[in-house]
Amino acid sequence: MSSENQLIAVKAIQKKLLGKKLTHREIFILMDEITHHRLSEVLTAYFVASSFKEGYTSEELYLFTKAMVETGNKFHFDGIVADKHSTGGVAGTRTTMIVVPIIAAAGIKIPKISSRAITTPAGTADTMEVLAKVNLTPKEVIKIVDKVGGCIAWNEYLNIAPADDIIIKVEEPLSFESFDKIIISVMAKKVAIGATHLILDLPVGKTMKIRHFYDAENVKKKFTELARKFKMKVVFDVNETLEPAGRGVGPALEAMDVLYVLEQKTERPLKLEAKALRLAGKLLDLCFSDMGIKKSGEDEARRILADGSALKKFREIIKAQHGDDQVSSETFKLKSHILEIRSPESGKIKEINNLNLNALAKILGAPNDKFAGIYLLKKLDEFVGKKEPIMKFYSTDKYLLKEAKVSLRNFPIYEIE
């Protein structure tokens, strides 16, 4: 039976390479073969290439998502289940770890399943792991969400849409991902976790996955159609992104930004706070409309953050995930060597090169070195004086600090005018 299915899967890839539509049976068998590692990486790569070239019809998008869900674990929670996702592409914008405790503190379940870094120096799972355990089992996720209302877990051990993780590993060396593939990947994981209400953050910019607003509109349209078929309510936040919303880039530095915001410290990155409140507000509006609650979502999100409820909930989540619930920005220790970088000239920050920022943070050791990364002392449109500190490099390896400083010549982060 297995060899017969393998033959069907290969023929399905051939069909897709020729631009033909696939049947429900062909799609299910193809996903099942990938999930159980019965298809070679070469054949999986051909499948990825075929989807990139031709894309999918609306029906194929639905069937591929459905098949991806059906070949893995599925979760069910009672009532409204909220979720949030960003198509991403920019480092240092760790909104998830602020949005999740706000939503959970509002009394709405939010089982957030996150990935590790793929193209950036830190994923949400990498950042949360600095503070708590993220490699949770399905039983632990259910127990934690039932107890405290939310979690921030890594998808590795949950067997949610497992074919997707295999496909990502094939795509990664090529930095090669079609919009349709992103849509299937996101929606499969949301359906599998049992989400009923979803906020999708679609950052647009020349270093984002989505580079043009017309592409964002196309992605939005396809997500809306797919969400309707799965009876999921979805709202979008399409935004131009030119720089990180926070100042820290790298797991521990991004965790510090999150703590600053949740603790409402004066030095908190206000753009990160504003973006998190906007996303949480839109998600609350979506949930409140079905709960008969006549409140402004963003006003409620702001109240929950300002009165300390979000911080209290975040600490409950950390404790449930076997972390230190007494952690704070003051007690949190950055176990790294630090190198201060000064500006070679004076002027206004005209541009921040996010690709170079990612590259240098990786040279410093992120995300494997949790305490490596870059802290931006200056952001867009701010003024900097000659020889004034402009950023700080962090690494547990002194040699990598020197290497990053040398590499900065070829990977400039700031453009000053």
Image: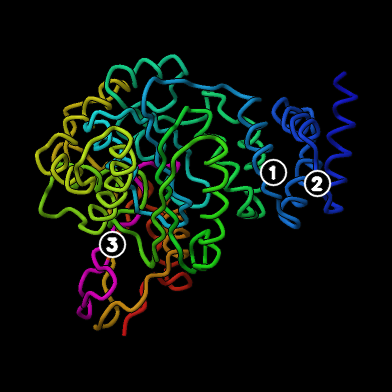
Tag 3: amino acid: Leu
- Residue at screen point 58% across, 48% down: 182
* Residue at which label 2 appears: 21
Q: CA distance from mark 3 to mark 1?
A: 45 Å
CB atoms of marks 1 and 2 within 8 Å = yes
Q: Is residue 109 visible?
A: yes
Tag 3 or tag 2, which sits nearer the N-term?
A: 2
Report crowding for label 1: few under 14, some 14 to 19, many 20 or more residues within 10 A (C-alpha).
some
Q: Quadrant of the C terminus?
A: bottom left
Mark seen at residue 59: 1
Residue nearer the viewer, 134 or 375? 134
Residue nearer the viewer, 380 or 209? 209
Which region of the structure is painted magenta?
A: 365-390
- Residue at screen point 51% across, 55% down: 220
Q: Is residue 403 visible?
A: no
* Residue at which label 3 appears: 376
Look at the numbered disc 3 and give the secondary structure of its residue.
strand
Q: Quadrant of the N terminus?
A: top right
Residue 387 is a magenta residue: yes
